Image (spheres, coloured by chain):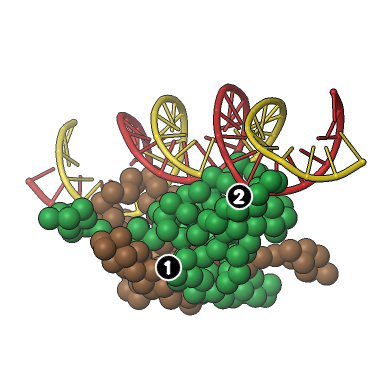
Chain colours: A brown, B green, C red, D yellow
Amino acid sequence: MEKDEKNIEVCPVKEALKVIGGKWRLQIVHEIGEEKKRFGEMKRLIPAISEKMLIQELKNLTAYGILNRKAYKEIPPKVEYSLTTIGKEILPIIEQIEMFGSKLINDENQ
Amino acid sequence: MEKDEKNIEVCPVKEALKVIGGKWRLQIVHEIGEEKKRFGEMKRLIPAISEKMLIQELKNLTAYGILNRKAYKEIPPKVEYSLTTIGKEILPIIEQIEMFGSKLINDENQ
DNA sequence: TATGGTACTTACATAAAAGTATGTAATACT
DNA sequence: AGTATTACATACTTTTATGTAAGTACCATA
């Protein structure tokens, strides 16, 4: 019996929310999109995020298998983040949320 | 100039997350789905939620225009909640999240 | 008079998430 | 020796979210 098989209660939505929940993760995934981005670029793309939260979430997303982290052995350091195959599966979720958000905004202006 | 028009920075994703963020809201919307549900039913359907959180979130979702609340003037009281038209627009988001969650679960069992 | 059912409300406590401020390593350039 | 660059790390504080426990109103029925 493998892990998870003993527990029939694994809810896909809950598992997903463990990964994409929180204030910054969707935005990070969204900003990276199909292209790799350096740490410094991310800071500029999401000015409101603190450095602490940015590396923390980059780390978490990497640990969850959503991001690839590629470090170049250079000084000053250079690190690139990109979406993994499964990480890219988050993009359609973001699209749906975006569509819903737009409808919300239109709705309330009437 | 109406509210919101002065601020060009309204991000649909952020607006959406204000509404569907948090631990319980998606689950509540999911449980109601296409059918109206009474408060007591919701408690049974989501046993892990506390009464406080349940009414609090039902109230919030109603205030956001996601839920309709219909109270019958009876004793003991009877209240039914159902998704509004725009509330139903959340269902496809949940579907996408569910699909992603399933992929996550499959992925990690290999 | 007491009990039960239903949909709440309130005060209080705890836990989780996020923010602030400061520090570090390694090397290149001045 | 001093400064800059880049990607972090760490301690600490504040804010936000969630949980616990108890109580309320209303009437019906036993």
- Residue nearest the viewer, comparing B13 with A69: B13
Q: Residues within 10 Å of mark 2 (few under 14, many from 20)?
A: few
**Picture quarter with the N terminus of chain A:** bottom right
Regarding residue A18, the answer to whether it shows in the image is no
Identify the residue at horizontal 50%, vertical 48% (top origin). Answer: B59
Q: Along the horizontal axis of the image, is A44 left or right of C25?
A: left
In the image, residue B54 above or below residue B26: above
Name which residue type carries label 1.
Ile
- Name the image quarter holding residue D9: top left
Residue B108 % position (x, y): 64, 70
The residue labelled by disc 2 is B73
Vertical relation: D9 (above or below) A4: above
Q: Residue at x 65, y 49 (%)?
A: B74
Dot 1 corresponds to which residue? B86
Res A52 visible:
yes
User: In which image quadrant can residue C12 be found?
Assistant: top right
A51 left or right of D3? right
| Residue B3: image location, x then y, percent | 20, 53
- Mark 1: which secondary structure? loop
* Amino acid under disc 2: Lys
Residue B96 screen position, x and y as percent: 51, 74
Q: Quick check: C6 above or below A25?
A: above
- Of all chains, the one bearing label 1 is B
* Residue closest to the eye, A102 or A65: A102
In three-dimensional space, the C-alpha distance between marks 1 and 2, rounded to whole angstroms, equals: 27 Å
Q: Left of A70 or right of it: where is A76?
A: left
